[in-house]
Structures are given as structure tokens and as C-alpha cells.
Amino acid sequence: MEPLPSDILADEIPPASAVDSATPEAARAFAESVAIMARLRGPNGCPWDREQSFDSIRKYTLEETYEVLDAIERRDWPNLAEELGDLLLQVIFYSQMAADEGRFTIADVLGTLNRKLIRRHPHVFGEDASAAAGNLASVDAAVNGSASRVLANWEQIKAAEKEAGGAKLEQESLLDQVQRAQPALAEAAKLGSKAAKVGFDWSHWRDLLAKLDEETAELVAAADAPVHDPVRQQEIEGELGDLLFTAVNLGRHLKVDAEMALRGTNARFRQRFREMERVAGESPGKPLSDLTPAELEALWIGAKVTLSAVGSKTISKSGVGE
């Protein structure tokens, strides 16, 4: 891998005392982490670490990612620092395994990242620096503070990278740019966003409400069919998928991330259900399993009212909801 010209960062990045003071310490700590992992994977290292493969630890990568999201949502900053460390461990672990197999090293990972950041930000580092980092696209670096212009340049530079790498862009589907390896809700939103670029989209978010009604009716028709065989079950699954896809794109039109919206709903459901359990357990108390549907519904409504009141008090005191 070709190194970056030494003057790119020195000339283009403005001084920042907080960053400057943290950089040497961070560099030493990162080097120590890399050395620790190399020892763990070494001949006299940890048997468990030595046995791991790309396939065996990939599940932990997803798990650590969601733990980072959870810490952010809870605003638990000490825990977020720990979870980010766990996520970084995954990167170091993969890189060490690759180095053991002679594929690439952590230096290659960092070098690739640095070149990409400079290459795709000509408005920050300058067009010459961007070109030196491999940018082959002709873009307008004068974005004038516009995030949409930044994204447009990013896409052009990214497309030029693929073309230079031998990708036959004219034979690819536009949707091939959306990776399958991601949560389905995120994939649905990105598919809708890509299709919208060629005009295949709903003109207004209200149009999606009618589409939701249509998809709901189709799901009801499939579920109400008298025959329930594997083929019918696949049809029900397909109709439910269509309903979810429409809901995700409604969120996109409303500038709401469906994954984050659902995570918020899940968190509220947990809180309300826990409150139901608390109230039901008060003297004389009954387990939820012994209550009638009407009693459960009453508890649910009560939990919503109670937690809503608590949330209102929190907002009035701090100015933000917690």
C-alpha cells in the first residue's frame, strides 16, 4: 500500500489542542492493544483466542455493535467507552487473524481508512490531497457548507473508485450498491432511497398511508384464507414483508430511521411491561399469567399513564427526556 504524502495532514488539518494532547497517548495505547492481541494469538498465548476464526467471532461483532447503540441510547458514557473498546477489539482481532494468514495487517486497515477519508473529503483536505489519496473523480470541492453537496461528491468519488477497480458500472443494478449484509430495516430504507434517485418513489409521505392500508388488506386476505399450507405461509410472510417495507419507507419520507424508531418502541414496551409486573405484584398480588385479557389491558393503560407522567416530570426538570 502506498503511504500518504507526509504533508497532507500537516498542511490541511488545523491545530486542535485537545486532539494534539490526546494523540500521542492514543497512539501508544493503540499500539499496546495490537501487541496484546498478537501475544494472545501467539505460540504461548491464549488457547481460546488461538482457536478463533473469522467465522467463529463474527457473531460477537454484531453483538458488540448493538451494545454500543444501547449505551448511546442510555447516555451511559462510561459504559460507551467500554463498549467502543470491545468493538475496537473486533477490528484488532480480525486484523491479527488476517496477519497470521498473510492477508493484511492492522496498518493496512488504518492506511486504507486514512486514504479513503482524505480521498472523499476534497472540500476539507483540498483537491490536490484528495487526488494524492487516489481520487479520480472531478467534483466541485466548494460545497459551501451544504451536506447534500458533500454526499453528492462522496457518491461520485465512490463510483470512480469502483470503476477504477474494474467494476462494470453500466451493467450493475443501482440497487447493487446497497449491501445485503445489514439489518433488514436499514436495507429497506437504503433500497427505497436508491430507487428514489431515479424517480421511483412516492411523491408525498401521505401517499404511503394509503399504501399501508393496501398492504394491510392483502395481509388480512392471505391470513384469512382457509388453506394453511407451506405455500400459504410463504404468501403471508411475503405480505407481512411488503407491509414492513412500506412502513420503513414511510419513516424515510418522514426522516425517521426505522431501526431507531423500533428500538425506541422496544425500550418503551420493556418499561411498560415492567410497570405492569410491578403493579400486578403489589399486595395481594397476582402473576400476569393469572389475569384476564381485560385486566391485562387495564394494567397496560395504567402503565402508559404512569410512565408518561414520569416522563413529563423529567422533561420539565431537565428540559430533555431521559
Image (tube, rainbow, N blue to C red):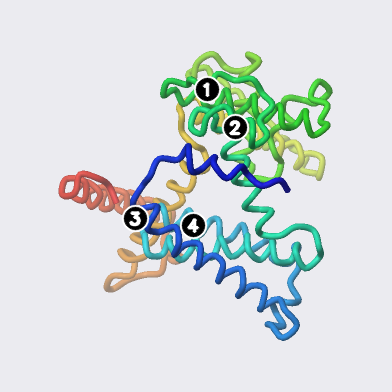
Q: Provide the secondary structure element on which disc 4 rests.
A: helix
State which tag comes first along the sequence, 3 or 2.
2
Which numbered tag is attached to residue 130?
2
State which tag comes first along the sequence, 4 or 1.
4
Q: Provide the secondary structure element on which disc 1 rests.
A: loop
State which tag comes first along the sequence, 1 or 3.
1
**Pointer 3 local density, CA inside 10 Å: few below 14, some 14–19, many at least 20:** many
Q: Nearer the viewer, mark 4 or mark 1?
A: 1
Quick check: marks 2 and 1 in contact, CB under 8 Å? yes
Q: Which residue is mark 4?
A: 68
State which tag comes first along the sequence, 2 or 1.
2
Q: Residue flagged by tag 2: what amino acid is it?
A: Ser
Q: Which residue is mark 3?
A: 299
**Residue 163 in sight:** yes
Image spot of residue 321 (x, y percent) = 27, 47
Q: Residue flagged by tag 3: what amino acid is it?
A: Leu
- In space, the residues marked 1 and 3 are separated at their CA atoms by 58 Å
Image check: 51 left or right of 60? right
Task: Please count the marks in the image.
Answer: 4
Q: Which residue is mark 1?
A: 141
Q: Provide the secondary structure element on which disc 2 rests.
A: helix
Is residue 107 shown above or below 7?
below
Q: Residue flagged by tag 4: what amino acid is it?
A: Val
Image spot of residue 245 (x, y percent) = 62, 32
Q: Residue shown at 52%/26% (left/top)?
A: 150
State which tag comes first along the sequence, 4 or 3.
4
Image spot of residue 194 (x, y percent) = 64, 25
- In space, the residues marked 4 and 2 are separated at their CA atoms by 31 Å
Is residue 7 shown above or below 243?
below
Q: Provide the secondary structure element on which disc 3 rests.
A: helix
Image spot of residue 168 (x, y percent) = 83, 26
**Pointer 2 local density, CA inside 10 Å: few below 14, some 14–19, many at least 20:** many
